[in-house]
Image: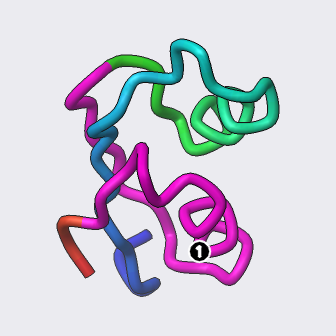
């Protein structure tokens, strides 16, 4: 991951009472608890997952 561009994603919303697909998207991003952060490789697939749940996550590092 040293030579690839990464982004840091933080979970800011709860998946409680959300659609099953939104909960699965958070798990796919590696997020399962409030305020948890993950560093992910910046790919179109990851960006698409972030765009699916913008109300539950925040990109804090690009």
The furthest residue to the right: 21
Q: In terms of image quadrants, where is residue 51?
A: bottom right
Q: Which residues make up the magenta segment?
A: 34-59
Q: Quadrant of residue 47?
A: bottom right
In the drawing, does residue 31 fall left or right of residue 12? right
What residue appears at the point 65 percent right and 60 percent down from the top-left corner? 52
Q: Residue at x 30, y 58 (%)?
A: 58
Residue at point 35%, 71% (across, down): 7
Q: Could you tell me residue 50's position as x and y percent?
A: 55, 62
- Report the quarter where the N terminus lies: bottom left
Which residue in the structure is indicated by mark 1?
A: 47
Q: Position of residue 46 (x, y in %)?
A: 62, 67
CA neighbours of label 1 inside 10 A, class few (<14), some (14 to 19), many (20+): some
Residue 38 shown in magenta: yes
On screen, residue 9 versus residue 42, left or right, reads left
Tell me residue 49's x, y (percent): 66, 60
Q: How many marks?
A: 1
Locate residue 60 relative to residue 45 in the image: left or right.
left
Image quadrant containing the C terminus: bottom left
Residue drawn at x 59%, y 15% is 17
The foreground one among 58 and 28 is: 58
């Amino acid at each position: 991951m040293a030579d690839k561009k990464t982004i840091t994603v933080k979970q800011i919303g709860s998946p409680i009472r959300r659609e099953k697909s939104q909960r699965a998207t958070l798990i796919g991003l590696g997020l399962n608890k409030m305020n948890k952060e993950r560093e992910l490789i910046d790919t179109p697939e990851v960006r698409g997952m972030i765009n699916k749940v913008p109300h539950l996550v925040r990109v804090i590092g690009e």
